Image: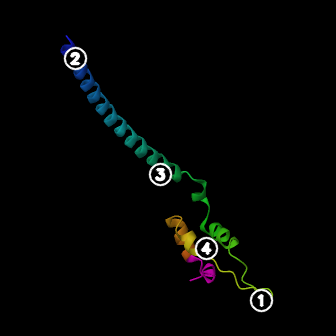
Amino acid sequence: LVEEILRDKRAELSALGDEIAQLELTLWSHRKKHADLGAEVTQYSSILSPIRNVPPEVIGDIFLYFTPPIACKRGVALVKVKLPWKLAHICQRWRSISLSLGHLWPFLDL
């Protein structure tokens, strides 16, 4: 009698283990689909971004707004930043704009 109960319980345990494995596989599949769909949503959302409608000249003016003043005051060293490099790494459009602004590059600190 005990052996029969034990055999049934082991079979039930094995069946539950198989079911758990299948559910974990399904969960993994759904998580991957969720991540892929999220990436697509992000990609399509970027197409609708208002910044894409801003003319390059205006973006260039905004870039120049963040450059430090070039004049020195009372022996204070000229502040240089790596702004052109940072702007060039945002996206392809910003890279093109930042590379086209020759007056932005004197601020480059190598």
Q: Residues within 10 Å of mark 4 (few under 14, many from 20)?
A: some
Q: Main secondary structure of the magenta part?
A: helix
Q: Are marks 2 and 1 in contact (CB under 8 Å)?
A: no
Residue bearing the label numbered 4: 83
- Return the disc, 3 or 4, that comes first in the chain's sequence: 3
The type of residue carrying mark 3 is Gln
Is 102 magenta? The answer is yes
Q: CA distance from mark 4 to mark 2?
A: 70 Å
Q: What label does residue 8 carry, if any?
A: 2
Q: Residues within 10 Å of mark 3 (few under 14, many from 20)?
A: few
Q: Position of residue 5 (x, y in %)?
A: 23, 14
- Return the disc, 3 or 1, that comes first in the chain's sequence: 3
Q: Are marks 1 and 4 in contact (CB under 8 Å)?
A: no
Q: Residues within 10 Å of mark 2 (few under 14, many from 20)?
A: few
Q: Position of residue 74 (x, y in %)?
A: 81, 88
- 3 or 4: mark nearer the eye: 4
- 2 or 1: mark nearer the eye: 2
Q: CA distance from mark 2 to mark 1?
A: 88 Å
- Return the disc, 1 or 4, that comes first in the chain's sequence: 1
Q: CA distance from mark 3 to mark 2?
A: 53 Å
Q: Residues within 10 Å of mark 1 (few under 14, many from 20)?
A: few
The type of residue carrying mark 1 is Gly
Single out the residue that lies furthest toward the top: 1
For residue 22, which quarter of the picture? top left
SS state under label 3: helix
- Return the disc, 4 or 2, that comes first in the chain's sequence: 2
Residue bearing the label numbered 3: 43
Residue bearing the label numbered 1: 75
Is 108 magenta? The answer is yes
Q: Are marks 4 and 2 in contact (CB under 8 Å)?
A: no
Vertical arrangement, residue 53 with respect to residue 57, above or below: above
